[in-house]
Image (cartoon, rainbow, N blue to C red):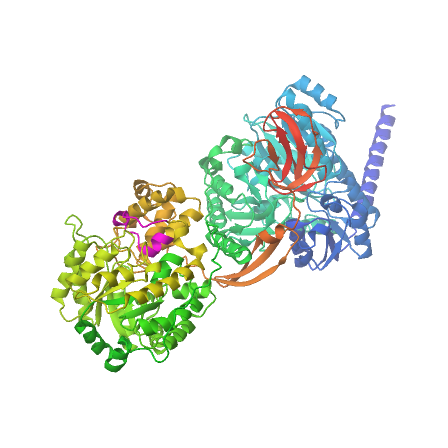
Amino acid sequence: MIRYSLVQSSLSLLAVKRVCLLSRFAHSARQTEYRPIKKVMVANRGEIAIRVFRACTELGIRTVAVYSEQDTGQMHRQKADEAYLIGKGLPPVAAYLHIPDIIKVAKDNDVDAIHPGYGFLSERADFAQACTEAGVMFVGPTPETVRKMGDKVEARSLAISAGVPVVPGTDSPISSLQEAQAFAQTYGFPIIFKAAYGGGGRGMRVVREYEELEENYQRAYSEALTAFGNGALFVEKFIEKPRHIEVQILGDKYGNVIHLYERDCSIQRRHQKVVEIAPAFQLDPHLRDRLHADAVNLARQVGYENAGTVEFLVDKHGKHYFIEVNSRLQVEHTVTEEITDVDLVHAQLHVCEGRSLPQLGLKQDKIRVNGCAIQCRVTTEDPARGFQPDTGRIEVFRSGEGMGIRLDSASAFQGAVISPHYDSLLVKVIASGKDLQTAASKMSRALAEFRVRGVKTNIPFLQNVLSNHQFLHSTVDTQFIDENQELFNLKPTQNRAQKLLHYLGHVMVNGPTTPIPVKAKPSSTDPVIPSVTMGEPPVGFRDVLLRDGPEGFAKAVRAHQGLLLMDTTFRDAHQSLLATRVRTHDLKKISPFVSHNFSKLFSLENWGGATFDVAMRFLSECPWKRLQELRALIPNVPFQMLLRGANAVGYTNYPDNAVFKFCEVAKENGMDIFRVFDSLNYLPNMLLGMEAAGAAGGVVEAAISYTGDVSDPMRQKYSLEYYVKLADELVKAGTHILCIKDMAGLLKPEASKLLVSALRERFPDVPIHVHTHDTAGAGVAAMLACAEAGADVVDVAVDSMAGMTSQPSMGAIVACAKGTKLDTGIALEKVFDYSEYWEVTRGLYAPFDCTATMKSGNADVYENEIPGGQYTNLHFQAHSMGLGNKFKEVKKAYTEANKLLGDLIKVTPSSKIVGDLAQFMVQNDLTRAEVEERADELSFPLSVVEFLQGYIGIPHGGFPEPFRSKVELERGKTLHIKALALGDLNKAGQREVFFELNGQLRSVLVKDTVAMKEMKFHPKAQKSIKGQVGAPMPGKVLEVKVEVGAKVEKGQPLCVLSAMKMETVVNSPLAGTIKAVHVTADTSLEGDDLILEIEE
């Protein structure tokens, strides 16, 4: 009996063994069939599609892309060999979830295999089954495995069967809120909802209080339904502050399963990974082994094939819990590839074809870890606003590259449009190094090289993470971001070039942004031209110049009895009073009268200075043609111009040959006298201008720019001795005439006597010419004092164009000098006629007249020392900016700015530098002491920086210290910009403006303010109006929870928005009654679009 039993038992064992062998043989015969892949479709979009395409190309496999209607411009469809539209007429996400379309495209185009990527259909068993039934290989696990692993509840049950520890949770997906409430009552809070059929943070919500349960259940269900096509959820006990560790697995069709080590994905926000590291830093070796073993055992238990990830939570005690299996390729697979040198996509494709892991050289004992890799997900999210997704057009994109850096991207390029329909991922940056610190250093360097303009990114936040001490030297958990608020101390980007392009584009589309602060309109009265006698005009000083040359001319001026006048009406007077806006047309009409009645003028100033700038930019005139036409009409009076030394008529130093050629051409076209000055009295710059004017054959009038007060013994930086020494150098250099250029009108009568007397005594044979402004009202007295002391020529303007910030009155000087040794020989009644013409003409320029905002001069110029023309401009600008009532502060700031810069001589361009600094101080509410203290951190106007760099010369007494040393003098930051073209109006009321910036094509979108008035747009919420609720981000309205007339409490949900597959609840900012609702479900919104209005 026993023997029989033994024999029977032996036979049974043999039978079982035979059955097993036959089964294995049959399995082997079925599984070893090799099906080469010749064409692969990727049922996905963005960077993962491109990642798979690249692997296919490397393996000689043809590629097929699919795309939604919204993705016609995306890069992934351009990277494939073929591309086909799917989901026509469907919403953006739904298109990529439409299985029938995807299968049809695959069958119609002889696709051998479909790679699902991650997200969308990648964990849908019905999609894997549809592929199989269509005879198309699915690059991933079998449909049954996808079903088991994709259903997190069943995966949890399998893990328990495999002896893998799990977190307490529901055994099956819940179908109601009541089930969630029951679970919370059993296990307590906190709990977490998770999507049963997908991952990536969608459908995942942590609930800490009972009051939050219903709202979070609804949001999690809705997100899961939108992202994965199934809203099923399960509930788990939420483990506080765990590490999130996942193990990469790879299986084949023959039962072989290996791991490729682990990744630490603990740095998360809203349950979405931000930074991933492989291998996990400072992970206990025994725990690492247990994680690997549990992951492989679970995969073997279900016969897992292809790539997948087993995810675990590790609590603070070192205990690990299984949470889910992602039966697909992960976003962060890149770091595993970097440390193992295994191309996971290659492996996926080969396994799908039927190759075994050993055939691919992938055996567990051969997989080694090499160094460390970090992946940062650069997203279009704003960390400063709770990581709200940002949308828009990428205007600038420049990536960080170099040794140890890998970039996986799709939509990261200039001109790409980031929509609210899809994930906010812009580019994955992967850095590799020998250890964590080395990899982090490379990553920091790469991120610092990135330039992304047009949309917000999380790069500043990532940089803070990478420099965090805990991240670099210790372990982090899933609460790392929440517990390190210093990560949100974001360093602002300068973005100088793009801001400048936006400003220039706005001006090109909409015109100047500075409004005219007055309502004055041009006069309708035409000026009456005084009668002019027939015949040639009388002989004038120009005849002397043409006959005797510059030296003879200077002698004639010096020998002249009486006071000579230069008339500034044709240039400096209207520059000071009318913003240089007088047209050549009005100058030409009065020119014959001047030629016939003012032949005894020393000269007529009519060119140079701001003439060029304004004529070409605002008047659309040729300044050269103006000179030619006026010369033909006034042949007898010398013309005089203002030459800014090495700056010519510009605002920066020009090459020497350009200055020489300019003077030569000016002389050929009728210019006679060149008043040469430098804003800092910097001799090298002046000598260049003098030499250029002399070489052209012109009269050289070297000007000493005057500031300070030589009659005040307490102010000795610019002393009488200083001016006499400077005059010595100018006379030695060969000037024909010596000029005192008092651009701010600071010369008082006593100072006039002292300065002119000293110069006359020192240079008895050199003509002296004095220029001033009448800002304080003492101009006539000062000029008469100069004449009494020995000056030969003084500057005046005709009466109706004189006074205030212009020159002293011609009529006043003529009348006061009449019958004295200073008699000008000019008929006073002719001055009256001349003045009457300009009084009426001035009315034509009423919108630009300084009297629109300034009613008088002011003696405070002796304190602030603002030059006449600049005084007018600053006053005008202050009113334009709404600071008219603060002009006193602007003037005070000008005084302080001048002291900061070392007490400069102030005339263009140095006066502009002081003015720029003054306005910078007022706009930023800075005192002189604060500017000095914070000089090393403030972003000063470029003109100030360039002055301190020595661009316009060296000021008397040197640069101000320690101020200069503290200012960051960024060299090499010159921007070369050329405007190219304006685009057509688009549906959003914008025009694309094209530029060339530093040799590269750039464009910006600018709203056409005129066109937009005729277009209909959704209203914006006004932050200044309490109760107006705006969209916190671009997106689509999913649900409106209130209606007009409803009572709401502060914090009550009003509506739900969806952007980039994440949902946001908009809560009420106050208690009140709903006055108006401006949206409905499915309304698409931009940021700050008005949602509703609440009345308190």
Q: Is residue 871 magenta?
A: yes
Q: Is residue 151 above or below residue 914?
A: above
Write the start and end of the magenta stretch as one range.
Answer: 855-872
In the rendered structure, the answer to whether residue 1049 lies left or right of residue 544 reads right
Residue 974, percent from left and from top: 41, 59
Q: Quadrant of the N terminus?
A: top right
Nearest to the observer: residue 48 or residue 894: 894
Residue farthest along the top direction in this orientation: 185
Q: Is residue 718 visible?
A: no
In the picture, residue 217 is in which quadrant? top right
Q: Is residue 501 visible?
A: yes
Q: Quadrant of the C terminus?
A: top right
In the rendered structure, the answer to whether residue 111 lies left or right of residue 771 reads right
In the rendered structure, the answer to whether residue 380 lies left or right of residue 149 reads left
In the picture, residue 381 is in which quadrant? top right
Task: Say how many tags the image has.
Answer: 0
Residue 912, percent from left and from top: 35, 55
- The structure residue drawn at horizontal position 15% and vertical position 62%, both measured from the top left corner, is 789
- The structure residue drawn at horizontal position 67% and vertical position 57%, both measured from the top left corner, is 79
Nearest to the observer: residue 320 or residue 871: 871
Nearest to the observer: residue 458 or residue 909: 909
Q: Is residue 456 above or below residue 1023?
A: below
Residue 11, percent from left and from top: 85, 33
Residue farthest along the left direction in this orientation: 761
Residue farthest along the bottom direction in this orientation: 547
Q: Is residue 730 magenta?
A: no
